[in-house]
Image (cartoon, rainbow, N blue to C red):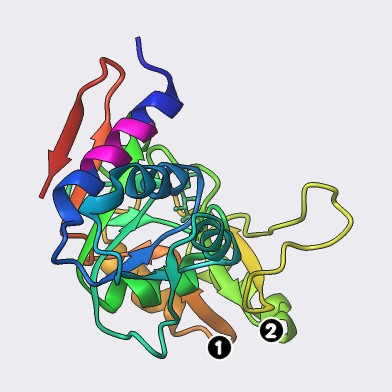
């Protein structure tokens, strides 16, 4: 039986092997624990990866992974046309819509995903569901400007979330602050049968910067299974 970490590693390795070639020039790097294996595989593959290749990060964490790996770091404002972006997810439904932002990075992740010709998700088996909200019970991560969070919370209740929660740091000493200096509200809406509709409604709320619902963005998803195999969904 394969552990969750094995499953993450297998999914990440296969996604790198199948999507990053010597032709790839600009690559977006997502955030989270699965993405660590993406970088690990890129480094293992050495010569197969173009030495001129530029890596665009989605967070402080992925920026560090790129720098510590000795890879070429680029910024989205220099490299806004990305060949492929590989990122993790908190939950992925059967249409490859995803909840992201468990690490509070979904704003930059969405920008770097949208800039890519191909957006690829890598995840372990626990993230796969038929309908969003089935597995990830923490709620949809919503990045809000600090000035507006008290206004956004009641608005989310009106949209059907019973208990929107301001995400706190593990120490409980203060709120989680995103790489953009904003706050995160986690809002659980139960099963999300119409993710596009929900995304549009939340996005319209004043003070909301970005929503961790990635709808119609994913080209492929790699799921590491418990038995050591990897499922590829398109
Ligand atoms: C960060 C993300 C991550 O990709 C997501 O939380 C998955 O993380 P992990 O690979 O650690 O399970 O969206 O904002």
The residue where tag 2 is placed is 148
Characterize the local packing of mark 2: few (<14), some (14-19) or many (20 or more) Cα atoms within 10 angstroms. some
Which element is circle 1 on?
loop
The residue where tag 1 is placed is 206
Q: Nearer the viewer, residue 210 or 86?
A: 86
Is 50 situated left or right of 127 in this image? left
Looking at the image, which residue is at 42% across and 60% down?
Answer: 30
Which element is circle 2 on?
helix
Q: Are marks 1 and 2 in contact (CB under 8 Å)?
A: yes
Point out the image quarter for the N terminus.
Answer: top left
* Residue 129 visible in the displayed image: no
Residue 8 against residue 57 in the figure, above or below: above
Is 158 situated left or right of 48 in this image? right
Is 104 situated left or right of 220 in this image? right
The residue segment tinted magenta is 8-14
Image location (x, y in percent) of residue 151: 67, 81
Return the disc, 1 or 2, that comes first in the chain's sequence: 2
Q: Magenta residues: mostly which secondary structure? A: helix
In the figure, residue 185 lies in which quadrant?
bottom right
Q: Nearer the viewer, residue 145 or 57?
A: 57
What's the CA distance linking mark 1 and mark 2? 8 Å
Residue extending farthest to the top is 1
Q: Tell me how many marks there are.
A: 2
* Residue 179 visible in the displayed image: yes
């Amino acid at each position: 039986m394969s552990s969750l970490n094995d499953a993450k590693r297998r999914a990440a390795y296969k996604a790198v092997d199948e999507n990053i070639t010597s032709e790839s020039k600009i690559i977006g790097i997502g955030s989270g624990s699965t993405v660590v294996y993406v970088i690990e595989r890129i480094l293992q593959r050495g010569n197969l990866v173009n030495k001129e290749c530029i890596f665009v990060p989605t967070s402080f964490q992925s920026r560090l992974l790129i720098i510590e790996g000795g890879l070429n770091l680029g910024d989205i404002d220099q490299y806004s046309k990305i060949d492929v972006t590989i990122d993790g997810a908190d939950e992925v439904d059967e249409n490859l819509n995803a909840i992201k932002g468990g690490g509070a990075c979904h704003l930059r992740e969405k920008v770097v995903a949208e800039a890519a010709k191909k957006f690829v998700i890598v995840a372990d088996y626990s993230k796969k569901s038929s309908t969003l909200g089935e597995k990830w019970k923490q709620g949809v991560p919503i990045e809000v400007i600090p000035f507006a969070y008290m206004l956004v919370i009641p608005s989310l209740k009106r949209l059907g979330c019973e208990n929107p929660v301001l995400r706190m740091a593990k120490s409980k000493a203060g709120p989680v602050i995103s790489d953009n200096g904003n706050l995160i509200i986690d809002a659980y809406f139960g099963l999300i049968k119409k993710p596009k509709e929900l995304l549009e409604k939340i996005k319209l709320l004043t003070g909301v910067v970005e929503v961790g619902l990635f709808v119609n963005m994913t080209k492929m998803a790699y799921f590491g299974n418990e038995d050591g195999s990897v499922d590829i969904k398109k």
